[in-house]
Image: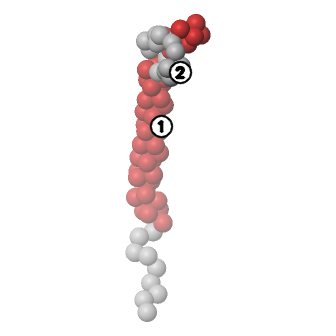
Amino acid sequence: MNSEKSLLPPEIWLSLLTPPVLGGICAIATVTQGLRDLGEVSEEVFRGDRLPLLPFPTPSSYSESPTDESP
């Protein structure tokens, strides 16, 4: 059919495709940094010194409560 070469030389194609590639690289770097910051914030939320202390029962409280209610 039509065996013509492309209408634009390779230099033009290269110059047209460079900004989207560089923009993609910058976007990936920004998203990566944002996810890293989000991970650090979530670590701070779940760090032990910011959580309330839970009253765990001691072994002596187990022996005080009856386990078998049969007469």
Earlier-in-chain disc, 1 versus 2? 1
Q: Amino acid at mark 1?
A: Thr
Q: Nearest the camera: 49 or 60?
A: 60
Q: Nearest the camera: 21 or 59?
A: 59
> Where is 50 relative to 68, above or below?
above
Image point 52% across, 15% down: which residue?
66
What residue is shown with label 2?
68
> Where is 24 relative to 39, above or below?
below
Q: How many marks?
A: 2
User: Disc 1, disc 2: CB below 8 Å?
Assistant: no
> Where is 56 relative to 29, above or below?
above
Q: Nearest the camera: 15 or 35?
A: 35
Q: Nearest the camera: 39 or 29?
A: 39
In the structure shown, which secondary structural element does the residue marked by tag 1 occupy? helix
Q: Amino acid at mark 2?
A: Asp
Label 1 neighbourhood size at 10 Å, few (<14), some (14-19), many (20+)? Answer: few
Q: Residue furthest bottom?
A: 1
Q: Position of residue 45 (x, y in %)?
A: 43, 20
Where on the picture, by quarter, is residue 30? top left
Image point 40% across, 58% down: which residue?
16
What residue is shown with label 1?
32
Cα separation, mark 1 vs mark 2, equals 57 Å
Could one spot residue 56 in this view of the protein?
no
1 vs 2, front mark: 2
Image point 46% across, 43% down: which residue?
28
Quadrant (top left/top right/bottom left/bottom right) for the N terminus: bottom left
Q: Residue furthest right?
A: 59
Image point 45% across, 68% down: which residue?
9
Mark linked to residue 12: none
Could one spot residue 23 in this view of the protein?
yes
Q: Position of residue 61 (x, y in %)?
A: 53, 8
